[in-house]
């Protein structure tokens, strides 16, 4: 998996993760979804053939919050 850094954009944080195969994309997206369920904090996930773009914001707060940073940390570690 290759990736860029998380980028702040319009009160969200986003990052695109690149993969060699679609199987790797699906496995990673499923891990991200499990993190979202466990943390009750749900990102936007854009799945392409060889990449996954994850965007997160705290809609209750109206911007990126500590909850978002916990989510980002968990995603970075999966």
Image (cartoon, rainbow, N blue to C red):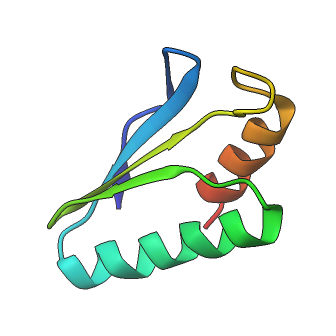
Q: Which residue is farthest right?
A: 66
Q: Which of 61 and 27 is in front in this view?
A: 61
Relative height, residue 34 to residue 59 (above, below): below
Where the C terminus falls, by quadrant? bottom right
Q: In this view, does 12 lie to the left or right of 20?
A: right
Q: Position of residue 25 (x, y in %)?
A: 31, 72
Q: Is residue 59 left or right of residue 7?
A: right
Q: Position of residue 9 (x, y in %)?
A: 47, 17
The answer to which quarter of the image holds residue 72 is: top right
Q: Nearer the viewer, residue 45 or 27?
A: 45
Q: Which of 59 and 11 is in front in this view?
A: 59
Q: Residue at x 58, y 17 (%)?
A: 11
Q: Residue at x 80, y 46 (%)?
A: 70
Where the N terminus falls, by quadrant? bottom left
Q: Where is residue 51 in the image (x, y as percent from the top left)?
A: 25, 58
Relative height, residue 24 to residue 68 (above, below): below
Q: Residue at x 46, y 32 (%)?
A: 5
Q: Which residue is drawn at 18% across and 70% down?
A: 20
């Amino acid at each position: 998996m290759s990736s860029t850094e998380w980028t702040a954009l319009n009160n969200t944080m986003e990052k695109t993760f690149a993969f060699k195969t679609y199987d790797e994309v699906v496995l990673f997206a499923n891990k991200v979804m499990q993190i979202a369920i466990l943390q009750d904090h749900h990102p936007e996930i854009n799945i392409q053939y060889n990449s996954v773009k994850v965007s997160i914001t705290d809609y209750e707060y109206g911007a990126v919050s500590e909850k978002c940073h916990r989510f980002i940390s968990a995603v970075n570690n999966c």
